[in-house]
Image (cartoon, rainbow, N blue to C red):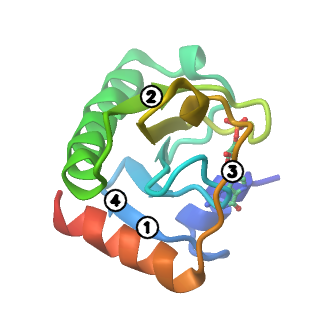
Amino acid sequence: MASIFTKIINREIPANIVAEDDNFIAFLDINPNAKGHTLCVPKKEVNKIFDLDEETYNGLMTFSRKVALALRKTIPCERIGMSVIGLEVPHVHVHLIPLNRMADIQFKKKISLTNEEFEEVAKAISENL
Ligand code: 5GP
């Protein structure tokens, strides 16, 4: 069965898309640790990051860096943190999270945003790419 992220890639379910090319997509996390929390995902559906072929792995890092630089320009923060977990969605994704303190990367404290805020943030990041 297609992963939830493949459904986003195929536009079967909605997401706030920030960036996309032939092989990768970035969209806002639906349950963010911080404003601007973004997921970078290879379109190829693979469960675990270190099972990606080397070209896709390196491509994902290059794509994530580009999105992280746009995120840094958009969201005032101390730095952008990067994390790979995958315990919830078995389709490789890199979390990019604006950080001000260690707690921001710990997936414990979540923030809530309105649909309008999600849309505004996604647009602002994509305009800084
Ligand atoms: P992980 O698999 O790395 O533990 O976490 C998966 C992440 O995907 C979580 O932060 C969760 O909020 C996010 N997520 C799960 N389902 C959806 C969805 O349908 N849309 C979006 N945008 N994010 C999702």
Mark number displayed over residue 82: 2
Amino acid beneath label 2:
Met
**Residue under the image location 48 percent in, 57 percent down:** 35
The C terminus: image quadrant: bottom left
**Residue under the image location 28 percent in, 50 percent down:** 76
Q: CA distance from mark 1 to mark 2?
A: 18 Å
Residue on which the image places disc 4: 20
Residue 41 percent coordinates (x, y):
49, 44
Is residue 79 shown above or below 12? above
Q: Nearer the viewer, mark 1 or mark 2?
A: 2
Q: Secondary structure at mark 1?
A: strand
Label 4 lies in ligand 1 vicinity (Cβ under 8 Å) = no
Residue 31 percent coordinates (x, y):
68, 57
Q: Nearer the viewer, mark 3 or mark 2?
A: 3
* Mark closest to the chain's N terminus, 3 or 1: 1
Residue on which the image places disc 3: 110
Q: Nearer the viewer, mark 4 or mark 2?
A: 2
Question: How many residues crowd around disc 3 within 10 Å: few (fewer than 14), some, or many (20 or more)?
Answer: few
**Residue under the image location 53 percent in, 26 percent down:** 83
Residue 106 percent coordinates (x, y):
65, 29
Amino acid beneath label 4:
Glu
Question: How many residues crowd around disc 1 within 10 Å: few (fewer than 14), some, or many (20 or more)?
Answer: many
Q: Nearer the viewer, mark 4 or mark 3?
A: 3
Residue on which the image places disc 1: 17
Q: CA distance from mark 4 to mark 2?
A: 19 Å
